Amino acid sequence: MFFIDEMKKIIREKDIQNLGIFVDMDGVIADYRFGEGKNILNNVSGVYRDKRPIGATIEVLKELNREIKCRMHILSSCYHSEQIKEKNDWLNEYASFFELENRIIVMSNTFENRKKLKIDRMIEMMQKFNYDYVVLIDDTHDILFLAIETLHEKVIPFHVITLLD
Ligand SMILES: [Mg+2]
């Protein structure tokens, strides 16, 4: 798998000892259907629980978890507290290798604010687990750019497409 080889190369080149990996959900491991934002804002029941899992990216991440020494986090956001449970139930079913204590699901009532909230939580985890580097995998360019602005060379950003062979 391209991504696994790429990660091994980066770990070797940067001599990474303690790596944290942060994975977004919607548009990365769960389908994102264009226009569904209004259902999320309106707290429509099942909006997250019934999402289609993206088997190809989930398999790559599962393999990454087996192949390299790292801690795998979920870094996701939602708008209503009920949606946190939906996301956790979904993860338990489709991607349970993300352990409950390593899942970060921030609550935000605007689409803009959530990017900063997610980066702030990533920094918190960096300090808590003493990571020397973090990998951020997301489908939104804005948050990848914000991560670089905030963490500079300590973050290794990937757009979701790089996971695919
Ligand atoms: Mg996303």
Image (spheres, rainbow, N blue to C red):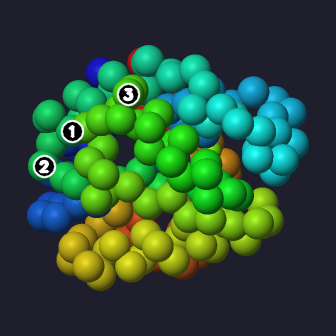
Q: Disc 1 on helix, strand or loop?
A: helix
From the image, tell me which residue sits under label 2. Answer: 69
Q: Is residue 82 left or right of residue 9?
A: right
Q: Residues within 10 Å of mark 3 (few under 14, many from 20)?
A: few
Q: According to the image, label 3 marks what residue?
A: 93
Q: Earlier in the sequence, mark 3 or mark 1?
A: 1
* C-alpha gap between disc 1 and disc 2: 7 Å
Expressed as whole percent of the image width and height from the top left, the position of residue 95 reads 35, 32
User: In this image, 116 relative to 129: left or right?
Assistant: right
Mark 3 vs mark 1: give the one in front.
3
Residue 10 visible in the displayed image:
no
Image quadrant of ligand 1 equals top right
Question: Vertical placement of 24 versus 91: above or below?
Answer: below
For residue 65, which numbered disc appears in the image? Answer: 1
- What's under tag 3, amino acid-wise? Glu
* Residue 159 vertical placement versus 54 (above, below): below
Alpha carbon separation for disc pair 2 and 3: 24 Å
Which of the numbered marks, if any, corresponds to residue 161? none
The quadrant of the image that shows the N terminus is top left
Which amino acid, mark 2? Answer: Lys
Given this view, does label 2 or label 3 mark the residue nearer the observer?
Answer: 3
Q: Amino acid at mark 1?
A: Asn
